[in-house]
Image (tube, rainbow, N blue to C red):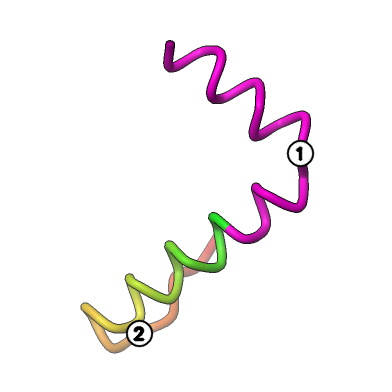
Amino acid sequence: MKCSSLRKIINHPITYIITAFIMSLIHYCLTGSPLSF
């Protein structure tokens, strides 16, 4: 299940960008520093 969902994210780069943006936003809210990739 994890593999198929990962494949979906890879097949949809826009989804990946949105997910990465949301994750970095949450990380910024929690720690006060931007997430470095």
Image mark for residue 35: none
Instruction: Please report whichever mark, 1 or 2, sits nearer to the chain's N-terminal start.
Output: 1
Q: Is residue 37 left or right of residue 13?
A: left
The residue that label 1 is drawn on is 12
Residue type beneath disc 1: His
Q: Residue at x 43, y 76 (%)?
A: 25
Return the residue nearer the eye: 31 or 17: 17
Query: Mark 1 near mark 2, Cβ–Cβ under 8 Å?
Result: no
Eyeballing the image, is 36 above or below 5?
Answer: below
Quadrant housing the N terminus: top left
Magenta region, residue range: 1-18
Residue that numbered label 2 is attached to: 33
- The spot of residue 35 in percent (x, y) is 44, 70
Q: Quadrant of residue 12?
A: top right
Q: Position of residue 33 (x, y in %)?
A: 35, 84
Neighbourhood count class around disc 1 (C-alpha, 10 Å): few under 14, some 14–19, many 20 upward: few
Q: What is the three-letter code of the residue carrying label 2?
A: Ser
Classify 10 Å Cα crowding around label 2: few (below 14), some (14-19), many (20 and above). Answer: few
Task: Looking at this view, name the residue that lies furthest to the left.
Answer: 30
Q: Residue at x 43, y 80 (%)?
A: 34
Residue at x 66%, y 26% (from the top left corner):
8
Picture quadrant of residue 11 = top right
Say which quadrant the C terminus sits in: bottom right
**Is residue 16 toward the left or the right of residue 1 in the image?**
right
The residues bearing labels 1 and 2 have C-alpha atoms spaced at a distance of 28 Å
Q: Is residue 14 magenta?
A: yes
Q: Residue at x 67, y 57 (%)?
A: 17
x, y percent for residue 5: 53, 23
